[in-house]
Image (cartoon, grey):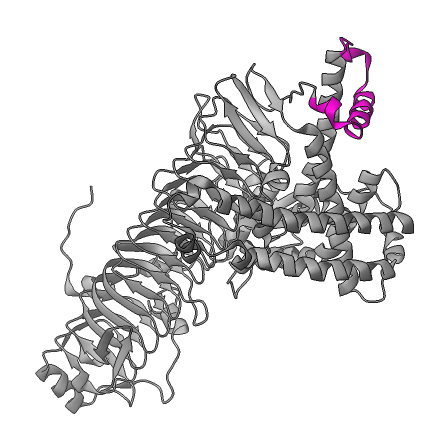
Amino acid sequence: MEKVTVLTPEQLFDSWMDPEFIPPGKDKYYIRNRQVRTPKGGWRHLRSDEIEILVLNNNNALSWDKIWVTDGFEPRMLHNNRFYGTVRIGRVSNNGLQYHDLRLPIGITNSSIHSCDIGDDCAIHDVHYLSHYIIGDRCMLFNIHEMATTDHSKFGNGIIKDGEDEKVRVKLQIMNESGSREVYPFDGMIPADAYLWARYIDDRGLQDRLAEITQASVDSRRGYYGTVGESCVIKTSEIIKDTKIGPFCYIKGASKLKNITINSSEKEPTQIGENVVLVNGIVGLGCRIFYGCTAVKFIVGNNSNLKYGARVIDSILGDNSTISCCEVLNNLIFPAHEQHHNNSFLIASVFQGQTNMAAGVNIGSNHNSRSNDNEIVAGRGFWPGLCSSVKHSSVFACYTLLSKGAYPAELNIRLPFCLVSNNEKKGELDVLPAFWWLHNMYALSRNDWKYMNRDNRITKVQNIEFDTFAPDSMEQVIRGRGLLELWTAKAWYAKENNPIEDYTEEQLRAKGRELLEGDSAIVDSLEILGEGMEKSKRRVRIHKVHASYHAYGDMIIHYAVQNALRYLEDNPGETLTSISAQFRNSRQREWVNMGGQLMMSTDVDRLRFDIREGRLTSWKDIHKRYNDIWRRYPLDKFRHAYLSLCSLLGVDRISASDWQRSIDEEIRIRKFISSEVRRTRQKDYDNPFRRATYRNEEEMTAAIGTLDENSFVKQTEESTAIALERLENLRTMI
């Protein structure tokens, strides 16, 4: 246990930094002096009359010779203060500052200030201990108990300073609880970085280089001061230690902020609110964290929120996300995640974006082994229903919707856009592929608009694919069609008492394709069972296979034609025929969701190789590579969409007549989407139980409006009319 020791006055004020870490010819302030902007006109000593005024106002300094000011210094605005070490104070006038309802005079009162630099026109009042900080211009600091910086401050970065032991390095144990996928956090880290690091743990060369790059990304020398950017407001807070605070940040009522970086700017200010505890982490631009939240060993991305008692530990939260009232441990969460309920748990998981956690959800705390190295991986759009409980280890395809239930065994759901239900009455798992397309088009169509509309980031470091129909989800659709073909054929031969061992997989798929392209009544009469989807002996029943198979086909057509239209409008002079000649190679079937940005696996492999070989030597270089791939992505995506349509049509190259038929199909599909958006929303208005809460039609209309007034329904119908015109124009681009 640490003991309280007695220090001499010299030790008390001069021993902040161990002399062994000060270079020859330098003093303990040599880094501080580089951090500070020298004011116009420079610093000067206090005049004797200024010292006299300060003393009369009950100010005290161990040595007035160590107090430096500028010509704009007004000593009458300082009262009841204690100054220790070298303190530099910028302009002090007799004006005041206001932020919301807080009004304070410029000046310093009732404070103890140790070796700090204070900018122009600051209001610092009742700060009981302010040590080794650089305060920007026009800052308001009011009623703070302790605000200090140590000489080995790392501000949340996962590095070690000179002379420190490796054991003090902050590491984030993401994706599972064993620490096998731990990463070193750093200011500017995005989910793509964390996924690259944590996913490819078998690539030892990559692991070593990323560790070296991160250690080199922050100066390991001791002696850096904490900083508070210009126009910050910090009031009524307890402990702020080893914290770097960006400009225009607002902190009120925080309990403890320790070893963190809070990014903030005039256009993207961050706010930290009441009773918040943040330790060992990085907060992104434009964040809101308030009302009793606790985060320890964490990264919160830009434009994200923690609210109402959220607990976040050993986790990374991507941009545009909100977590409140719940517990989140050992996770890597990609952008656009929503979790709002006090009794939900998310543990040891990778959520790949655009996800939503309902109340009572328990994801990952149910272990099926004696170890803590289990994991859950959920593709984009994962949505577990109320009170769902899922066991480690499980995998979910894009846009999987879990109905309420306690799922008794591990799951590997390979069919995207599906509804999964735990049928306890029959003792089986029910899966309805393409559920979103068939029965919830309003929500599916609203997804793209919703996530784009919520992306209020100005600083966009993490590239994000918001389209529902993108290479990751569509590859799963293509594989899903293959599974439905295979399982349909097996069900047919089982009904005919014909041994499936007599047929190859290709023959089975051909038979399944024949059945699925034929009469729906025949397929609907079959008992079609999924395979390898649950670690149990009970049946996995696949529902509405014929309708789902054709829905998947419509998704591919929609994906291909929409991307063709978008690409040709962005590239005047190109035609469908000219670009078709470029796309003769095979379809890229492996895509990696890198924190929200989709990349071909070949690009990821090249990225890893270049990092291992030292061709990319910094995170700045790695981020530039992400951006280079992102700029090329529209063409890569269109190529994939084109070749996906080729696969659906069973051709190597799409002819002019194929395009015409595909455009005809897309016109049908767009009309279907528009009508389904209205129909699936109409159900809410027609639901007699929902209507029962209202006295009459007029009250219901006043509360929720009419269907014709629904903004998204109107938007969809208007955009559909425009899309149909654009599709007719596409015919001329062949």
Tell me: 234 left or right of 574: left
Whether 293 is among the magenta residues is no
Q: Residue at x 34, y 41 (%)?
A: 342
**Number of on-image labels:** 0
Residue 31 visible (yes or no): yes
Q: Residue at x 32, y 72 (%)?
A: 135
Residue 7 image-quadrant placement: bottom left
Tell me: 54 left or right of 66: left
Q: Report x, y in % for residue 486.
A: 74, 23
Q: Report x, y in % for residue 63.
A: 18, 76
Q: Residue at x 78, y 10 (%)?
A: 498
Name the residue nearer the viewer: 606 or 215. Answer: 606
Q: Report x, y in % for residue 468.
A: 63, 48
Q: Tell me the chief SS of the magenta region.
A: helix
Magenta stretch: give its range. 496-524
Name the residue nearer the viewer: 19 or 59. Answer: 59
Tell me: 25 left or right of 558: left
Relative to residue 686, is residue 119 depicted above or below? below
Relative to residue 304, is residue 131 depicted above or below? below
Residue 420 image-quadrant placement: top right
Identify the image quadrant of the C terminus.
bottom right
Q: Report x, y in % for residue 283.
A: 41, 57
